[in-house]
Image: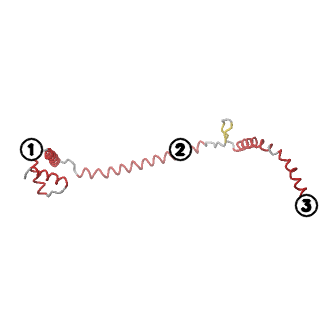
Amino acid sequence: MGPMNYKKLVEDYFEGLTSLDEEKILKDYLQNYHGNDPDLLEAQTIFKDFRQERDEPLNISFESISSDQPKTRIRRLWMYSGSVAAAAVLIFAFIYLFKLTGTPVVYAYVNGQPITDKELAMKYSEQALQTLSNPLSKGTAQLKHIDKLNKPAELLTVKK
């Protein structure tokens, strides 16, 4: 086979079109290749890396992988359940502390001071509303004369 056929064989290999026999021929040829064709040199480097990876021993035992899995799951389960329990304890502690301290309910603020007495808050609210409504009630005083406008209409109506 000439170099052009090996080039075609390399292209077919990377496209997945070669048979096992053609792959063996290509691997053997590239292992002993001493030319200067850049495509074949690149393929030679790739096949050399494949060979090194294949020959490298694998130091992982199945037992070490399989025995770590349950321990990790159990640890993770304990970690999550412990986190949930700690959060629940904190929430209940805060609720209990707020009930013990009897945090007063602030109904209103008057001049920057909190009013916690409901009766006093109602009194201040009524005063504020009264202050707002006084100018509005004075505005209706001049509407008393509207009755005089209705009298000519009564005179014009004919009584039977």
Horizontal and vertical percent position of residue 50 = 16, 48
**Quarter assignment of residue 15:** bottom left
| Category of crowding for the residue at label 3, using alpha-carbon neighbours closer than 10 angstroms: few (below 14), some (14–19), many (at least 20) | few
Badge nearest the viewer, 2 or 1: 1
Disc 2 from disc 1: Cα separation: 79 Å
Q: Are marks 2 and 3 in contact (CB under 8 Å)?
A: no
Horizontal and vertical percent position of residue 10 = 15, 51
Q: Which residue is mark 1?
A: 35
- SS for callout 2: helix
- Viewer-nearest residue: 1 or 28: 1
Q: Which residue is mark 2?
A: 94
Q: Residue at x 72, y 43 (%)?
A: 125
Q: Amino acid at mark 1?
A: Gly
Q: Is residue 36 left or right of residue 80?
A: left
| Category of crowding for the residue at label 1, using alpha-carbon neighbours closer than 10 angstroms: few (below 14), some (14–19), many (at least 20) | few
Q: Which mark is residue 131?
A: none
Can you say which quadrant of the picture contains the C terminus?
A: bottom right
- Viewer-nearest residue: 95 or 107: 107
